[in-house]
Image (tube, rainbow, N blue to C red):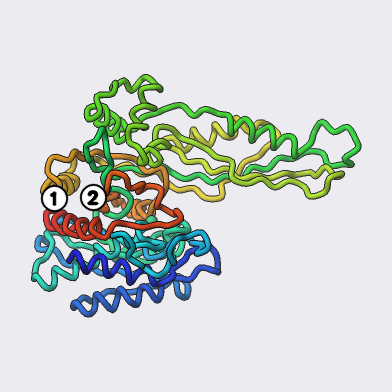
Amino acid sequence: MASDAAAITRDLIRFDTTNTGDARSKGERLASEYVIGRLQDWGYEPSYFEAEPGRGSIVLRIPGTDPARPGLVLHGHLDVVPADPAEWQADPFAGEIRDGMIWGRGAVDMKDMAGMMLAVVGSWKRRAVNPPRDIILTFFADEEAGGRLGSIWMTQHHPELFRGATQAVSEVGGFSVSLAGQRAYLIQTAEKGIAWLRLTARGTPGHGSAINTDNAAAHLVAALSRIAAYNWPVNLSPAVRQLLLGVAELTGLKPDLDDPEAITQLIEALGPASRFVGASVSSWANVTSVRVGDKVNVISSTAEATVDLRPLPGDAEAAIQRIKDLAGPHVSLEPIHLDTALEAPFDVPLVAAMRAALRQADPGAPVLPYMLAGGTDGKGLSRLGIDSYGFVPLRLPTDFDFTAMFHGVDERIPVDAIGWGAGVLDSFLLRS
Ligand SMILES: [Zn+2]
């Protein structure tokens, strides 16, 4: 199973499934045909759906031994973000092994998990075992562009495939971090929402030589300065609170969650993983694009900008109102894309099964929840009332900067982490 997982991961990396978010995307079809072929070789009968030509999702329901129990969606995605070979030390689409690592786009996001998922379900056929619950094994198209052609389309057009499922497992969690020299694992139980906003400033157009105190460009710049300078208040959700208290216990740092300084220290103690965790203590907005007139001596009537706002669970409405207030009276605001934040309970049997599988494979290592600042296909599944967890078990070397690998140059993963992860995933699913 371990060597299968690594071999399948390498095979999948060799399919260039780059998702550019537009018509230049390469699509998932060829990689999907490979996955379907593997599943069929093992005796499974997966289904395949395309929202647009070449943009495909795969679904396979593996019956559980206890039909009374609700199903579990185990999902991944086969698309990847672009990689510029000129920036890389290795060919991003060759799946090479160097220094014990598999190199390539998708090595951590998330052809590694796809390899682990497939190796595990393949081994079930050989071993003639079945999981306790129905497993709805799914590969969604288009995850890297928000899931319009994947999880959103599938849950709208084929909700029947997920009938009876109450929980889902996918990226991004289950990886190890080093805390005060001790290995610990983070399970993703929550993720922030998305509110992409367009801001339009309006003013009086005219000649650049005239005195103009109602200048759209100037209104927009002032609004964006206020938004960029705004210090979003810290508001700890249950998952983040539990994480930070766990970090305090393991490191001996002060567990004072009313003190912003103490919170910063606790986040920093997570090392490279602080990149993922840092943005989960508050809602936050970044200015991402600005478009104003194109002639130096013409004052244009409008000016536009986009803002990427990531609200905490329950804070979307208030956060959008905050942006409106900061933008001021000359600037109007409209949403480009809104998606929900997620928060699932940590003290449930599913997480206990994850903990038990980790405990068996890495005795004594603590397990903590965390909130992802980005978004996953879990948002699409939440429309069907399904709770999402991030659990891609990986035991990683202490000096390996895992979070930098996501969408990064020279993305790679230790070969033995994938083999270890497949074992833990198997043990978790059979206990779930
Ligand atoms: Zn991903």
Which quadrant of the figure contains the N terminus? bottom left
Residue 342 found in image quarter: top left
Classify 385 as above or below 159.
Answer: above
Q: What residue does disc 1 label?
A: 361
Q: Is residue 289 visible?
A: yes
- Is there a contact, CB below 8 Å, between mark 1 and mark 2? yes
Residue 334 picture location, percent across and down: 60, 45
Q: In what quadrant does ligand 1 lie?
A: bottom left
- Residue 75's label in the rendered image is none
Q: Is residue 101 left or right of residue 425?
A: right
Would residue 245 appear left or right of 90 to someone viewing this image?
left
In this view of the protein, which residue sits in the foreground, 171 or 70? 171
C-alpha distance separating marks 1 and 2: 9 Å
Q: Residue at x 40, y 57 (%)?
A: 411
Local SS, label 2: loop
Q: Quick one: SS at disc 1?
A: helix
